Amino acid sequence: MAGRSSDVLVIGAGVIAKATALALSKLGKSVTLFAPRDLLNVSATHASGAMLGSFAEFTKDRSGIADHHEAELRIRSGRSWEAWFEEISDGGDRLGRVRRGTYIVASNNGLMDLENIEYIQTQADKYGEPNEWVDPRDVAGLLPHRLSRAVKVLSLPNEGYIDSGVLLATLDGALARRAAVSVVDSPVTSLRLDGDRPTAVTADGERHTADDVVVAAGVESANLLDQLGVPGQHGTPTLLGGRGVSIVVRSPIEFPGVMRTPNRDFACGSHVVPLGDGRTYLGATNRLEVVDFGRPMPSLGELHSICHSLANEINVHLRTASVVECRAGYRPISSDGYPFFGQTAHPNVFVATGTYRNGVLMAPVIADVVAREVCRQAADQENPFDPRNREHLFADRDVNATMLASLRQVVSFVQEPDGNLPFDRAAELERLLAAFLRAGTGMEGGDEVADLFERITRRYPISEAMPILMYEVKG
Ligand SMILES: Cc1cc2nc3c(=O)[nH]c(=O)nc-3n(C[C@H](O)[C@H](O)[C@H](O)COP(=O)(O)OP(=O)(O)OC[C@H]3O[C@@H](n4cnc5c(N)ncnc54)[C@H](O)[C@@H]3O)c2cc1C
């Protein structure tokens, strides 16, 4: 079967593939982009709030080597984002713009809100980012329930956001103006190497070949790489899906910018993003899926969780907002938790994914780095997220400590949407879970838990003795 040929195949319909196709065409490459229109509505990009949260995404318990590199990637991309958007908008109808202003709202409902908002402020100072503590009563649009009042609010006047619909339409417009890019409206169903030449076959049965391929199909990227049989340093990467749900509503409430809690319970907190024209984006949930990334549908529980949090912690009048649209998508998470982009173990196969909660923000830099690598240009900065060399990222990783620390978020998210166990119950439950984890996995301290259990059950072999264990374990 005769095939069509170009310099590079780019596979994916979201922001990463589209930004990469544009970056490649800017460097003089002819590109075939496989971006089926009907898959767009199930992409993470479509579901996203498109906050450019370089600083809002700092979380106190994530300060290892890999977190440091990721923060620098966010900040670098955040600072180049508006110029990149201006560049891709050039020559097209102006559909919208990057807007600025983010308020981080710490309330008593978030177990770690106070620690995290203070950490965000210290990081903003460290990187010279304008920031200011503001009185919660002075923030227009912030009107929480009296039991969910804001404890502290931090204003980040430069932190940006955009309507994800505007972003995707602008990318499509830019691609349509590039003669060197041809967009195929059909998914790739088979990907293989003919010798060293990547060859893709679409659902329509068309065959396309090129010198190089960039796999940027979000959470499906690992399945495509599997077809090529290209191992990373430690085998083909696994991708997990951070299932996220969001809602677009109509409401007369005017928010002066993004209003969001710090990151919470494995998600990017609860947030509202003003979209203009009386529309407001409400997000977002995050639940890990490891197998099935079929067409995601929002569940009632997820919708309830978003509405409950935002109508109590941000503005009680959101309760009466009219729902325009509910969205869902999978954030692509690499199995080691960090972005994953650049050349793979095969010199003609490149990948761009693993962006998790921040792919919209990171797209300009990731696209630029990958396009330069495809063009064999020397990088102006080393890529710490190179798929072939990731050990350095985790030299300080302590998996046991990470798992024990995550129990606090587990206890917090099992209490959603209300988030209020009485007294000190949340901390007690966290200690009990930590004790079981130590004992069950042989971690340090596990023997002491087993001894305590033995002593208590020998003395009081009745079910009522269980709370004694809960009160006595050290966690
Ligand atoms: C609810 C939610 C809120 C978020 N909020 C933010 C935020 O505020 N800021 C931020 O920066 N990030 C945010 N993110 C994360 C961000 O959306 C992702 O990191 C980013 O969009 C990933 O982009 P992508 O192009 O890699 O993947 P996607 O956007 O998922 O796009 C991949 C596309 O490729 C398609 N595809 C799959 N297989 C094939 C194939 N074989 N052939 C062709 N196409 C294929 C998929 O169907 C999909 O349409 C959020 C994500 C979610 C879900």
Image (spheres, helix red, strand yellow):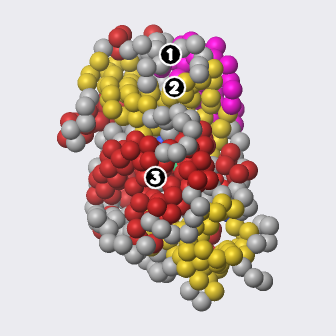
**Residue on which the image places disc 3:** 363
256 left or right of 128 in image: right
Residue depicted at 59% across the width and 83% down the height: 197
| Rendered-image quadrant of the N terminus | bottom right
Q: Residue at x 38, y 18 (%)?
A: 150
Asked whether 107 or 85 is in front, the reply is 85
186, above or below 234, in the image = above
Q: Could you say which is closer to the camera, residue 431 or residue 128?
A: 128
Vertical side of 252 occupied by 361: above or below: below
Residue 449, x across and y down, in percent = 38, 50
> What number is the disc on residue 254?
1
User: Which residue type does callout 2 highlight?
Assistant: Pro
Residue 376 image-quadrant placement: bottom left
Q: Residue 219 is drawn in which quadrant?
A: bottom right
Magenta residues (range): 299-325
Mark on residue 296?
none
Q: Give the residue at mark 2.
A: 274
C-alpha gap between disc 1 and disc 2? 8 Å
Tell me what residue is drawn at x 29 percent, y 36 percent: 120
Q: Is residue 308 visible?
A: no
Callout 1 environment at 10 Å: few (<14), some (14 to 19), or many (20+)? some
